[in-house]
Amino acid sequence: MKTNTFKFSVLKTGFFATLLIGSLSFTSCKKEEKPVDTEEAATEQNDAKFDDTKVEDDAEFLVAAAEINMNEIALGKLAQTKGTLKDVKDLGKMMEAEHTAALKELQDLAAKKQISIPASATEDGQKEYDDFNKKSGNDFDKAYADAMVDGHQKAIEKFEKAATDAVDPDVKAWAAKMLPALNTHKGHAEAVKIKTDKLK
């Protein structure tokens, strides 16, 4: 009886040890896995769906446009709480409202065209938000105004290209439709930048 009990005890101990090792291995593997960037995930889905390079270019533009809009919304909300100048807060409010409307239009267009776009902040977008969240006072105001001028200039260039080169007529029309608003945003940002440049 003692021998059998001893054997059972050894077997039982060995079994749980194996389970523990397996569990630890699984846990360590899981820890090493890096979350997939939302922009990268959307691009991979589109590459798998579309063979035509031109269509892929349209999809790539919509992915970039989604990232632009989400960034402007997030930073606009931040500017309303962290901004010191009223002009910065007002600029942030306008960015949040108008880019939220633009994002809704984009989501509807992407769904209609079966194009995947990021549903949440991209890796780069989150990093930019975190960097801004660390700033305060005049430093925040100056950095936000600078970013709005620079960001909208880059956005305008992307939208102008899509308004000319996009294959899908609806994508082309939407890009062209957004350009006046983006130019207006840039103009407002430039006016605010003139004021923030005077801050110490």
Image (cartoon, rainbow, N blue to C red):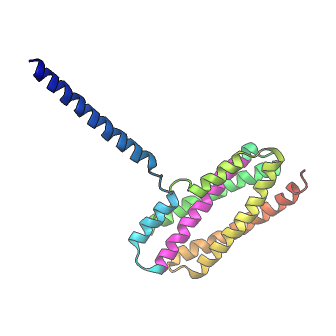
Among all residues in the image, which is located at the extreme top?
2
Q: Which residues are magenta?
A: 54-79
Picture mark count:
0
The residue shown at (41%, 44%) is 28
Residue 105 in view (yes/no) = yes
| Residue 58 within the magenta-colored segment of the rendering | yes
Residue 1 location, x and y as percent? 8, 18
| Residue 81 within the magenta-colored segment of the rendering | no
Quarter where residue 7 is shown: top left
Residue 23 location, x and y as percent? 33, 39
Q: Is residue 78 left or right of residue 32?
A: right
Quarter where residue 10 is shown: top left
Residue 70 in view (yes/no) = no
Q: Is residue 126 left or right of residue 40?
A: right
Residue 133 location, x and y as percent? 70, 46
The residue shown at (54%, 68%) is 62
Residue 18 higher or lower than 198, as above or below: above
Q: Main secondary structure of the magenta part?
A: helix
Q: Is residue 5 left or right of residue 192?
A: left
Near-viewer residue (149 or 14): 14
Among all residues in the image, which is located at the extreme left?
1
